Image (cartoon, rainbow, N blue to C red):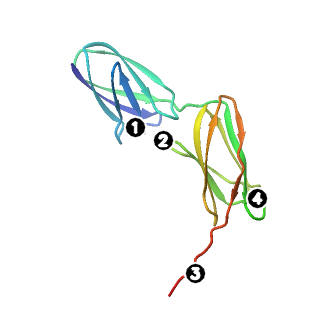
Amino acid sequence: MVRITGYVYDRNGRAISHAHVRCGDKSTLTNFDGKFELDLEVGNNVLHVNMKGFKYREVHINIMEEQTIFIHLDRETGFSKIYGYVYDAESGETLKLGIVTLVLPFTNLYVNINENGYYEFNNLASGEYELIVSPLNYIEEKFKVTLSEGEEKKLNFYCRRKVEEPSWG
């Protein structure tokens, strides 16, 4: 057995934590700085690396002695889209200030709610996503959605205004 040390990065050189690395029946997750270690047999091996939001990658390595390898993952893109409007739950008027967050394990995506209350995420791969809508002075709303490849989903959000508690004093 030979100890392999590796690092998993995105194409911008940022470490990817919690990426799954597998070789045969051995597997591990990368730590906060993208590092992993595996004890593998001498000879030809194939590492399988995957992380939600990134393209799956196979890395073929010939192991003769301890070594360090560096693996770069590309963002996973597709042809799916999530879009919609953000409304005041009571009046039905569109909300113009705030952010919609598409939650991903590595780096979230953010878009501003535009002047018409509209938001949009494009070029998404198929899979499950969580959205968090955060309009200014309104309670956040969360929603999970599953996309098929090439699917477009319209998700409208109806948010309730935050109630200010009177200060006691």
Q: Does dot 1 land on a helix, a strand or a loop?
A: loop
Give the label, 4 or 3, closer to the camera: 3
> Label 3 belongs to which residue?
166
- For mark 2, does the 10 Å Cα neighbourhood hold few (<14), some (14 to 19), or many (20 or more) residues? few
Which residue is at 42% across, 39% downward? 14
Q: Are marks 4 and 3 in contact (CB under 8 Å)?
A: no
Q: Is residue 76 left or right of residue 49?
A: right
Label 1 near label 3: C-beta < 8 Å? no
Q: Nearer the viewer, residue 162 or 17?
A: 162
Quadrant, the N terminus:
top left
Q: Is residue 31 above or below residue 89?
A: above
Q: Position of residue 124 (x, y in %)?
A: 62, 35
Residue at point 50%, 30% (across, down) = 74
Judging by the rendered image, the residue that carries numbered circle 2 is: 105
Residue 18: give its label: 1
Q: Earlier in the sequence, mark 1 or mark 2?
A: 1
The Cα–Cα distance between marks 2 and 4, rounded to whole angstroms, is: 30 Å
Mark closest to the chain's N terminus, 4 or 1 = 1
Q: Position of residue 121 (x, y in %)?
A: 66, 42
Q: Give the Cα separation between the discs numbered 2 and 3.
A: 38 Å
Q: Earlier in the sequence, mark 2 or mark 4?
A: 4
Q: What is the three-letter code of the residue carrying label 3?
A: Pro
The Cα–Cα distance between marks 4 and 3, rounded to whole angstroms, is 27 Å
In this rendering, the answer to whether 100 lies above or below 23 is below
Q: Which residue is mark 4?
A: 94
- Mark 4 neighbour density, 10 Å: few (under 14) some (14–19) many (20 or more): many
Contact (Cβ within 8 Å) of mark 4 with mark 1: no
